[in-house]
Amino acid sequence: MDAHSDLEMIDQAEGKCLCGAVAVAVKQLKPLVDICHCDMCRRWGGGPFMGVSGEAFSVTGKEHVTSYPSSDWAERAFCAKCGSNLWYRFTPTDHHSFAAGLFDIGDGAEIEQQIFVDEKPAFYDFAQETPMKTGAEIIEEAKAAGLEFD
C-alpha cells in the first residue's frame, strides 16, 4: 500500500510569484513535495528545492518568465521581474516540478522523497521521515527508465 494513498489530489491549484506577474495553475496537483538537496538546487534558491507537480498546467505572465538551461537535462525558470523561482523542468521527459511555495497547499501536503541526499549539507535536516536517495540512485533510476546521461 502506498504510504500517501489517503492524500487527496487538489483539482486545481493556483499559485503565483512574489510580485504576482507570473501565475501558475496546476490541475490534479499531488499534495506530495519532492525535496532536492543537490548543489545546483541549493545554489539556485539558497536551500533545497521543494517541488510539486500535477497532470497539466498553464502559465500566465509568460513574458516575465526567464529560463536557464542549468545542465544537459534540466532547465530552471524564474520570474524576471521579482526573481521568484518558478519551476525545474527535467528536459528528457518535459516534466515540470513547480516551487511548492508558489501555492497555498496547506497542511495536507507531505514530503514524498528527498533526493541527492549525498550532497545535503549537515547544517539542516527535515523532521519527517521520508525515502532518501543519493544522486547515484536517482541517475540509476533514470537510466533504468531508458534515459541517457553523460
Image (spheres, grey):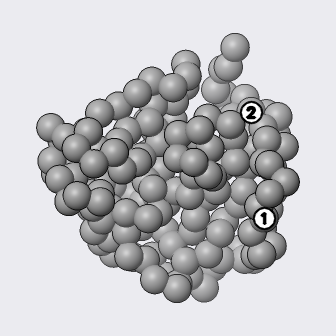
| SS for callout 2 | helix
Q: Which mark is residue 44?
A: none
Q: Residue 125 carries which label?
A: 1
Residue at the (51%, 26%) spot, across then down: 70
| SS for callout 1 | loop
Q: What residue type is labelled 1?
A: Asp
Q: Position of residue 122 (x, y in %)?
A: 84, 54
* Label 2 sits on residue: 139
Q: Position of residue 57 (x, y in %)?
A: 30, 54
Q: Circles 1 and 2: CB distance less than 8 Å? A: no
Mark 2 neighbour class, 10 Å CA radius: few under 14, some 14 to 19, many 20 or more: some
The numbered mark, 1 or 2, whose residue comes first in the sequence reads 1
Residue 48 shows in this picture: yes
Residue at the (52%, 84%) spot, across then down: 108
Q: Which amino acid does label 2 sit on?
A: Ile
Q: Position of residue 131 (x, y in %)?
A: 80, 62
Vertically, is 150 above or below 99? above
Residue 141 shows in this picture: no
